[in-house]
Image: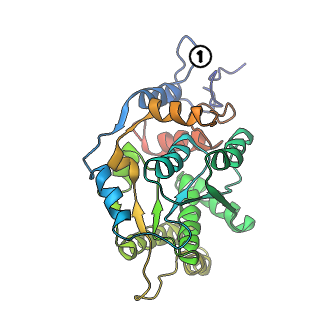
């Protein structure tokens, strides 16, 4: 019988660099534990909480909602909903993109948590054939399968914010993710600049993986990442964890008190997605153990 991690789906036969400790827990899970125990973002390096309050108090309020939150059912998104509603008093709309890889226990949090704290909630889905093809191509070419979800989620958040005249989109990005995504401000009020940056980034990725079908890449860009008219005001990008500071244990304790339950069917790494651990494994195989 092949050795397998007691907490996730990885085994030593298919993952040669996997190292199990005496408890049978692999090195990928242990690395996640270390991150979970530490302080992920130092407050004040991107701004202060008062900057966020001032931003919304200065008139950046919507007709029905002040802020849209990308919510995938994990602890970070749950805490972000709680933070914006309870501390800042914002009228918040949660948006969930159904990736097809969210676990059953994650769906319980998705359905129950926003309602439990009194936040409106919207669930969206991408075209099934297009989504599967995009996931497959990313899996075969770069191993960056999480980018597919990021692309769809950003596209749906932007579309929804524009349709409902929501002035800001809040993202639950923490620590290393902020640096990886070249985020150096807690608030990016110029939504046009942010959109053009995303447009260029995702455009390069799509044209790379659809080199044999350039028309498909251009169709995806036109449908999901159109550049609006210059006169159109775009929603600001807000990264509250960069302003507030973020401690994983504290975050999980608070959302657990509010009814969020850590899923036991996601492999022990992610708090919402069943294939995140596959992404981590692919990254290490392609880019080395420090990826």
Q: Quadrant for residue 272, please give it.
A: top right
92 relative to 10 in the view: left or right: left
Residue 149: quarter of image? bottom right
Coloured how? Answer: rainbow
Above or below, 147 against 83 in this view is below
- Camera-side residue of 52 and 44: 52
Q: Tell me if I can see residue 18 in this picture.
A: yes
Q: Position of residue 108 (x, y in %)?
A: 72, 42
Assign the N terminus to one quadrant of the image.
top right
Residue visible at 39% across and 70% down in the picture: 194
**Residue picked out by circle 1:** 24
- Left or right of 280? Residue 247 is left
Q: Position of residue 91 (x, y in %)?
A: 53, 60
In the rendered image, residue 75, in percent from the top left (x then y), is placed at 55, 40
- Answer with the quarter of the image where residue 211 lies: bottom right
Is residue 140 shown above or below 272? below
Residue occupying the point 65% across, 58% down: 121
User: Who is closer to the viewer here, 160 or 264?
Assistant: 160
Q: Residue at x 30, y 53 (%)?
A: 50
Residue 182 visible in the current orientation: no
Where residue 45 appears, x then y in whole percent? 25, 47
Give the position of the C terminus as an image quadrant: top left
Which residue is at 62% across, 30% downward? 10
Seen in the picture, residue 161 relative to 37 is either above or below; the reply is: below
Q: Secondary structure at mark 1?
A: loop
- Viewer-proximal residue among 239 and 259: 259
């Amino acid at each position: 019988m092949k050795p397998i991690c007691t907490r996730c789906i990885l085994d030593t036969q298919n993952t040669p660099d996997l190292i199990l400790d005496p408890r049978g827990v692999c090195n990928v899970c242990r690395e996640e534990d270390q991150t979970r125990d530490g302080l992920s973002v130092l407050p004040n390096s991107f701004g202060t909480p008062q900057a966020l309050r001032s931003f919304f108090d200065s008139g950046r309020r919507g007709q029905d909602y002040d802020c849209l939150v990308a919510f995938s059912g994990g602890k970070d998104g749950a805490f972000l909903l709680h933070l914006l509603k309870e501390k800042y008093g914002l009228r918040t709309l949660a948006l969930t993109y159904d990736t097809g890889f969210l676990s059953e226990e994650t769906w319980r949090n998705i359905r129950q948590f926003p309602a439990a704290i009194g936040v409106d909630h919207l669930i969206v889905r991408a075209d099934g054939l297009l989504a599967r093809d995009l996931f497959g191509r990313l899996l075969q070419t770069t191993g960056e399968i999480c980018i597919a979800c990021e692309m769809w989620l950003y596209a749906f958040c932007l579309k929804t914010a524009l349709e409902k005249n929501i002035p800001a989109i809040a993202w639950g990005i923490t620590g290393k993710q902020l640096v990886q995504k070249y985020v150096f401000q807690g608030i990016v009020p110029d939504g046009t600049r942010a959109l053009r940056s995303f447009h260029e980034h995702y455009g390069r990725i799509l044209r790379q993986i659809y080199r044999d079908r350039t028309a498909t890449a251009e169709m995806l860009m036109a449908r999901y990442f159109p550049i609006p008219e210059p006169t159109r005001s775009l929603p600001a990008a807000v990264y509250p964890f960069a302003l507030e500071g973020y401690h994983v244990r504290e975050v999980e304790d608070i959302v657990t008190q509010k009814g969020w339950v850590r899923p036991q069917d996601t492999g022990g790494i992610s708090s919402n997605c069943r294939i995140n651990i596959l992404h981590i494994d692919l990254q290490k195989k392609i880019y080395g153990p420090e990826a």
